[in-house]
Amino acid sequence: MKKFTISLLFVLVSLPVFSQIEVKYFNAAWNAANEIEWVDELSDCEIEKYDIGSNPADAGKFKVVVVPTILIFQDGEEVERYQADISFKMSATRKEVQDEIDELVMSAF
């Protein structure tokens, strides 16, 4: 019983660390040619997707001026922003974004 209690305590303490990192991904249906497919493959974070064509208020709320844009939040504060260039193409790679998430996860320990 003691091992179970310790294991359960560890799981409960560990869960908030991973749920504190959020990735917000912004694009629009009219920019589908520049969709970033690998966003769904990011790990150790919660992912939210926004279509600013359907809901332009989301772009204003997060000060998104070009799509696609990827924002990384930790504890509700923006810590990194990746934006497309003027041709609406993202230069950031999955590895770059995942490396940033991994650094944030490790810094929590």
Image (tube, rainbow, N blue to C red):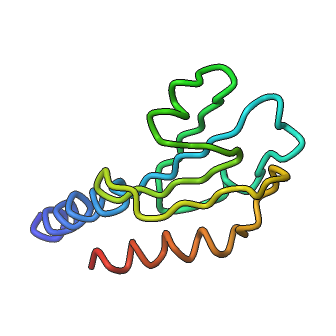
Residue 50 % position (x, y): 60, 34
- Foreground residue, 104 or 77? 77
Of all residues, the one furthest to the left in this rendering is: 2
State left or right for residue 52 relative to residue 76.
right
Residue 6 occupies which quadrant of the picture?
Answer: bottom left
Of all residues, the one furthest to the top in this rendering is: 54
Residue 58 % position (x, y): 51, 30
Q: From this view, report whether residue 107 is shown above or below residue 19.
A: below
Q: Residue at x 16, y 62 (%)?
A: 9
Q: From this view, report whether residue 1 is shown above or below residue 106.
A: above
State left or right for residue 23 relative to residue 7.
right
- Foreground residue, 32 or 48? 32
Q: Residue at x 64, y 29 (%)?
A: 52
- Total residue callouts: 0
Residue 76 % position (x, y): 31, 50
Q: From this view, report whether residue 66 is shown above or below residue 104.
A: above
Residue 33 occupies which quadrant of the picture?
Answer: top right
Residue 59 occupies which quadrant of the picture?
Answer: top right
Q: From this view, report whether residue 62 is shown above or below residue 4.
A: above
Q: Residue at x 22, y 57 (%)?
A: 12
- Foreground residue, 66 or 22? 66
State left or right for residue 12 relative to residue 33.
left
Q: Residue at x 78, y 51 (%)?
A: 37
> Which quadrant does the C terminus fall into?
bottom left
- Foreground residue, 87 or 103? 87
Residue 48 % position (x, y): 53, 40
> Which quadrant does the N terminus fall into?
bottom left
